[in-house]
Image (cartoon, helix red, strand yellow):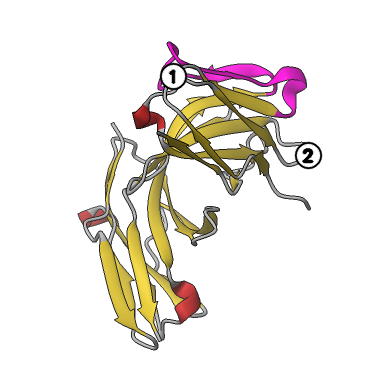
Amino acid sequence: AQKVTQAQTEISVVEKEDVTLDCVYETRDTTYYLFWYKQPPSGELVFLIRRNSFDEQNEISGRYSWNFQKSTSSFNFTITASQVVDSAVYFCALPSASGAGSYQLTFGKGTKLSVIP
Amino acid sequence: EAGVAQSPRYKIIEKRQSVAFWCNPISGHATLYWYQQILGQGPKLLIQFQNNGVVDDSQLPKDRFSAERLKGVDSTLKIQPAKLEDSAVYLCASSLVREGYGYTFGSGTRLTVV
């Protein structure tokens, strides 16, 4: 069964600090994707990134970076120089095929990030 | 392109009452999902449609929840009768078939059962 664990329930940082959100996953699939979503107070889930299990190269996109380590089943997300607008709940998610060419997402419980001005 | 539309945005009902939520997916998206997000948890899939057929409803509490997607476009999720534990945000999402995980979520309906 798919499982995603986000051990950090809440994190508070002061603006401009760096922050890393942790994600540990379990899957029996040999190839898989992983996602990060952001959920601001408005409630909509906003897609941030997906990574393929074949590609362990770390990626940087602006202030965001991701550290994917298949050996430890971790997919961590770092925000550099945090801003107040980064305040949200962040979810790590693992998709599994649900038939007919589509899939369902297994989410972690989320990490609530508060960036204090 | 317009996003996934959901209504109402908020709903408060008493237990044992019925309630319905509406979702209009992105035009052309064949796959539609309903997720339930209880406070403090990640979303959990309730039901998945492809066009107007059900792909997976294994986690839908069928004694009280029902969903339909007539004509393969918009969808309605109903709860009857509601229980206190049904208080949650109900998220609708849609995607193209075989798009490679191109999910788009709506803003959700926040249900409070009192």
Say whether residue B72 is magenta: yes
Relative to A89, does residue B88 appear above or below in the rendering?
A: above
Q: Residue furthest top?
A: B63
Q: Check contact, mark 1 vs mark 2: CB within 8 A.
A: no
Relative to B88, does residue A97 appear above or below in the rendering?
A: above
The structure residue drawn at horizontal position 40% and vertical position 22%, both measured from the top left corner, is B59
Relative to B22, does residue B41 appear above or below in the rendering?
A: below
* Residue that carries the numbered disc 2 in the rendered image: B27
Residue type of the residue flagged with mark 2: Ser
Callout 2 secondary element: loop
Q: Which residues are magenta?
A: B51-74
B94 left or right, relative to A72: right
User: Residue A37's x, y, as percent?
Assistant: 47, 56
Residue type of the residue flagged with mark 1: Arg
Q: Nearer the viewer, residue B111 or B1?
A: B111
A29 left or right, relative to B7: left
Q: Is residue A77 visible?
A: no
The structure residue drawn at horizontal position 39% and vertical position 54%, both measured from the top left corner, is A91
User: Residue B105's x, y, as percent?
Assistant: 59, 46
Q: Which mark is residue B16?
A: 1
Q: Are marks 1 and 2 on the same chain?
A: yes
